[in-house]
Image (cartoon, rainbow, N blue to C red):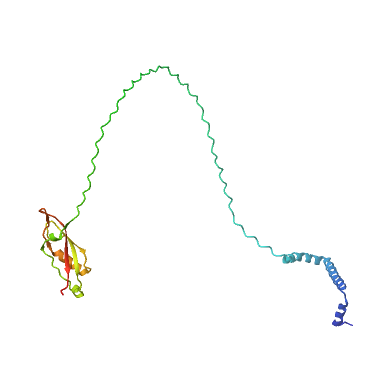
Amino acid sequence: KGLSPTRMDARRDDLSASQRRLVAAGMVVVHLGALWGLLQVGEVRETVIEAAPVFARLIAPPAPPAPPALPKVQPPLPRPAPVLPQAPQPLPVLAAAPSPVPAAFNVRVAPADPAPAAVAPVTAPPLPPSPAPPAPAVAAAPKVIPASAVQFSEPPAVEYPRLSKRNGETGRVIVRAYVEGAGGAPSSVQVNQSSGHPRLDEAALSAVRKARFKPYTENGQPVAGWALIPIDFELEK
């Protein structure tokens, strides 16, 4: 009776590991023996020999790819051999002909010149002292004409400023006028003493500029000088 698959599996399970190896080895030996028996037949052997190269070509691994071609490198050109400087050749030494011996001659010594007589030094007469430069002239101070000597051909016409009258500005202005020797209009007018009010000072200067002076004389000669002219500004009571 045949065994069921369940019973066969149960019997296989009863084998140990060593027993299983023996069974597998026996099967391999049986197959190798059958293969060897087949090879003993001439026709089978020739067929296997013809098919073996095909199997070898099919099983052989693919050939590795060819390496890329390297670029051709030109060999370095040979360097020219350095040219070494040649050592200078020695020049031939020529023997000089002997120079003739000069003839002897006598040297005549001229008599020495007599020493010159001593010359007495000539002393120049001393130069006269240069005159001292003249002292600079001191400018004389301008003449001040006395107040009693001041005379007018046209006396100063004084105008009282209206704004000064309205504000009650009063005072005395002394004007300093430079009168030429020929008289006439003064060449310069200045405020010698102020009244304290600019409008009154300007009115006094304007009046003296328009005045005309008589020439001032000393010993019958006209003399220029400064004249002091007082101008009074007073309000009527």
Count the numbered circles shown: 0
Left or right: 94 as drawn, with respect to 143: right
- How far across and how far down the image is residue 100, in percent? 45, 19
Left or right: 86 as drawn, with respect to 108: right
Residue 48: quarter of image: bottom right
- How far across and how far down the image is residue 28, in percent? 84, 70
Q: Residue at x 17, y 68 (%)?
A: 232
- Residue 10 drawn above or below residue 131: below
- How far across and how far down the image is residue 148, in percent? 13, 60
Residue 206: quarter of image: bottom left
Q: Residue at x 78, y 64 (%)?
A: 49
Nearest the viewer among 211 and 69 is 211
Nearest the viewer among 179 and 148 is 148
Nearest the viewer among 76 and 106 is 106
Residue 208: quarter of image: bottom left
Quadrant containing the C terminus in the rendered view: bottom left
Q: Residue at x 11, y 55 (%)?
A: 217
